[in-house]
Amino acid sequence: MTELPLIGGTADAPGPGTLTGARIGVITFPGTLDDRDAARAVRLAGATPVALWHADTTLGDVDAVVIPGGFSYGDYLRAGAIARFAPLMSVIIDAANSDARLPVLGICNGFQILTESHLLPGSMIKNDHLKFMCRDQILRVENTTTAWTRDYAAGQEITVPLKNQDGQYLADEKTLDALEAEGRVVFRYVGFNPNGSRRDIAGISNAAGNVVGLMPHPEHAVETGFGPELGSSTDGLGFFTSVLNKIVGDNK
Amino acid sequence: MPRIVVDVMPKPEILDPQGKAIVGALPRLGFTAFSAVRQGKRFELTVDGEVTEEILAQARNAAETLLSNPVIEDVVNVEVVEA
């Protein structure tokens, strides 16, 4: 097995991903924090991470895109509001809505960017308790048909880190009812709602299931010894193997 | 130079967590007359020269597309203020 450096760029230390040929882009905005972790998760899952810059105007030949967490543009105006208008976001919005249905995963600030982009409904406001919160969080996977969750079992409970200040998901009742009816609530908080999100919603998908956003951080739970103390500590890896299996399956 | 002021407020049906924290702090300072606080945002857009109808329309458009998020906020005021 190839040893991965603890802190690695996207280009060094080739992982098993070279075998599958799948290329997953990870976008960096000014103020993004978790791009390296997301790239590492992509590599551990067996794909090749491709660094994307917010000012790029093309996606290259990536098979999927991860919009990682952080504080793009310092969360100025609203979390994700300015990042949404970055040149590369226009390309990603078109690709996600195209017939090719580019798989897109938004984590934390990435989820906020996806709602500001109208790829996903609703919005996030400040946590109901007004504090930044960091904890190991149990989630229930309620939809295992999306591009990013097909390797999980329906109803499976996973534990991944959660860390945010503007994590309270809300939408009007009609939108919430529609999300529930269409099975688009992909993740729900279990045991404790950490931010006052409506109906304990932690993550949702678009109608086609190629775009998924969630507040907690699966990319921080992909390696034994470095993930949450509860659970298996690698519960987040399934996001990245799911999309990899979808890409490999589609290319057959 | 004239400015266009844009005021944005959280939608009435959305509980404003920041406003709630502020209303909790007021009585601790002896300000006991206020039963609720809602916190919004004020933007000042400076215009070089005269504010035409076209520029005002641009400001209204910017207010709806960038300065506010219609899911959680309302644009409650767009007005010209002469310096």
Image (cartoon, coloured by chain):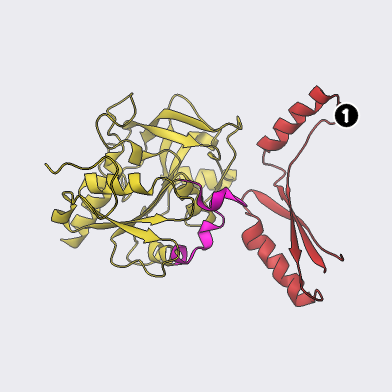
Chain colours: A yellow, B red
Label 1 packing within 10 angstroms: few (<14), some (14-19), many (20+)? few
Residue type, numbered disc 1: Ala
Which residue is located at x 23 percent, y 42 percent? A5
Which residue is located at x 30 percent, y 26 percent? A231
Which residue is located at x 66 percent, y 35 percent? B17
- Residue tagged by mark 1? B33
Judge whether residue A85 is colored magenta.
yes
Of A104 and A179, nearer the camera is A104
Give the extent of the magenta segment.
A70-90
Quadrant of the drawing holding the N terminus of chain A: top left
Dot 1: what SS? loop
Can residue A117 be seen in this snapshot?
no
Q: In this view, does B19 lie to the left or right of A72?
A: right
Of A58 and A119, nearer the camera is A58
Vertically, is A71 above or below A64?
Answer: above
Residue B70 picture location, percent across and down: 64, 54
Label 1: chain? Answer: B
Residue A188 picture location, percent across and down: 43, 35
Judge whether residue A205 is colored magenta.
no
